Image (spheres, coloured by chain):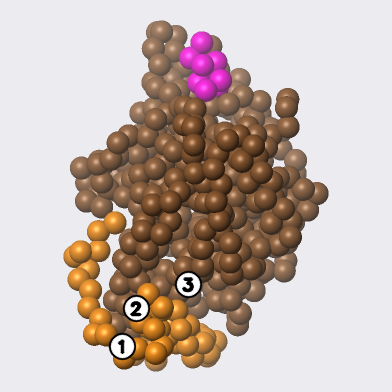
Chain colours: A brown, B orange
Amino acid sequence: MNAPRLSTARTIDQIAAARFAAADAEAHVAPLLDIAEAEATIFSRVERAEAMEHARRLDALARAGKSAGPLHGVPLAHKDMYDRARQVTGYGAREGAGKRAEVTSTVLARLDAAGQVDMGRLRMSEYAMGPTGHNHHWGIPRNAAKPGAISGGSSSGSGAAVAAGLVRAALGSDTGGSIRLPAACNGVVGFKPTQGRVPMTGVMPLAFSQDTVGPLAATVAEARLVLSVISGPDGIDPACKPATPIRPRAQGLRDGLTVGFAKGTFLDIMSDSMGAALEDVRVRMANAAMVTTDLDLDLLGTLGEAANAMAMSEAAAVHADRIALSPESYGDQVRTRLAQAVAMPGFAYVRARQVQKLARKAMFDRVFSRVDVVVIPTLFDVPPMEAELNIGGGQGIAALINRLVHFTRPINLLGFPAISLPVARTPEGPLSVQIIGPDWSEDLIADVADWLEAAVSPPA
Amino acid sequence: MDKLTDILAGRALTPSEEAILPDQAARTMRGIMEHPLLRRPDETPDLAATNPEENLL
């Protein structure tokens, strides 16, 4: 169905301002929930009662002349891997395989405190494993940007919900590209933060060394605002580091910003149309007095297996007990991927960690000593059609995944922040690039993305 | 725990899961054990050591 795009007429800022001025739980939130409930490929569960109760509380607050915060009354949703007290977290797994949470995750609690109206839970790849968005148990979310194409994964419902206009932003998670790939497939923005920027408390673990959580959103500004709300240590997750908070708003770029573009074999899998989009970005940046330069980034193309070995070994550790108890509850693709860990002995994991350390050093020495940010594709081309990639756990799954995550997975191994945004909308689908910076450079890459978004958007 | 032991021993895999292991082992060798950051083909490999405690991001 083609859902009315109720929420897309206004940005998060405009929604928050309007709801602060006029109570509208019944007029705005209720019909949006009706639409969400009809989108069964996108929402796994709409939390109608809780959303309406919360919206009415926010309306009462507004009537008293008070605002909950920067997200006052803004309808958001989240990938079904965030705990909320007394609700079941589903993990994209088979019916009955989720868990009833006792405590609300830090990020949801922070969004609540900032005034969100949490509409509920979004579809995802099973246990956040799967870059196409296919789910053995639940199918694949519809792609409003390119009907029939993959939604991308694993934050499949998050990308689809934003593209369909059901929400302005939604939470995802990214261990190998799971925010950026669905963002690219659905033609929206995805913001993967620095490893350790956002606490993972109450979030389903996949691979601790590379797990990150962040937003997918309709615009760079909205992604940034949501990320600024959920970031920072919570005193519980020891891996979450204190860092300068992210600014909630953009500021202009400084003069002489240097931007690196890859030359070499790393880009070999890129389509001609993706190459043209990338070149267009480079020309626009050069015309805006940024300094663009060629970089040898072939190292990135060598990091996929180290990232995969660490991620699958850690994921196998997470799932070992459960898969031993009920292997039949797992879909074919997830089982096959976890089985890869059998061919990843402990000494290979140690070597992979060593590659990680050396690769980070090389990136600082060779890349971020020369440029402020790097621009590379998010996906090799426009999103592929979903029927072509629905291969379950069959032979060829490793090659398929390697191709899809070629430009995203190395960034997780390195721990750097990256923001993906669409830079061209062709008849064949959207084309997106990533802007990547060193640790804790979220403000800079968001400022560059904000500029680029405006530069490639046709005037209203 | 018997089933977990079987998994660790590689005995609990389905035929299709077992079928991917040789390919995965080859990719582990090529992508990690022989990674150019760790060694060059013309060198006698150095002893490799890493301390996970130092692996701070």
Quadrant position of the N terminus of chain A in the picture: top right
Residue beneath disc 2: B38
Q: Return the residue nearer the eye: A322 or A434.
A: A434
Q: Residue at x 69, y 56 (%)?
A: A274
Tell me the amino acid under the disc marked 2.
Leu
Q: Residue at x 27, y 48 (%)?
A: A240
Q: Residue furthest right?
A: A427
- Estimate the spatial distance between the alpha carbons at disc 2 and disc 1, rounded to whole Å: 8 Å
Q: Is residue B10 above or below residue A320?
A: below
Residue beneath disc 3: A302
Residue B32 position, x and y percent, is 40, 79
Q: Return the residue nearer the eye: A118 or B51.
A: B51
Residue B26 position, x and y percent, is 47, 87
> Is disc 3 placed on a helix, strand or loop?
helix
Residue A107 position, x and y percent, is 36, 40
Tell me the amino acid under the disc marked 3.
Thr
Q: Residue at x 77, y 48 (%)?
A: A426
Span of residues in magenta? A13-21
Query: In this rendering, would A79 be left or right of A266?
Result: left
Residue beneath disc 1: B45
> Is disc 1 placed on a helix, strand or loop?
loop
Tell me the amino acid under the disc marked 1.
Pro
- Estimate the spatial distance between the alpha carbons at disc 3 and disc 1, rounded to whole Å: 19 Å
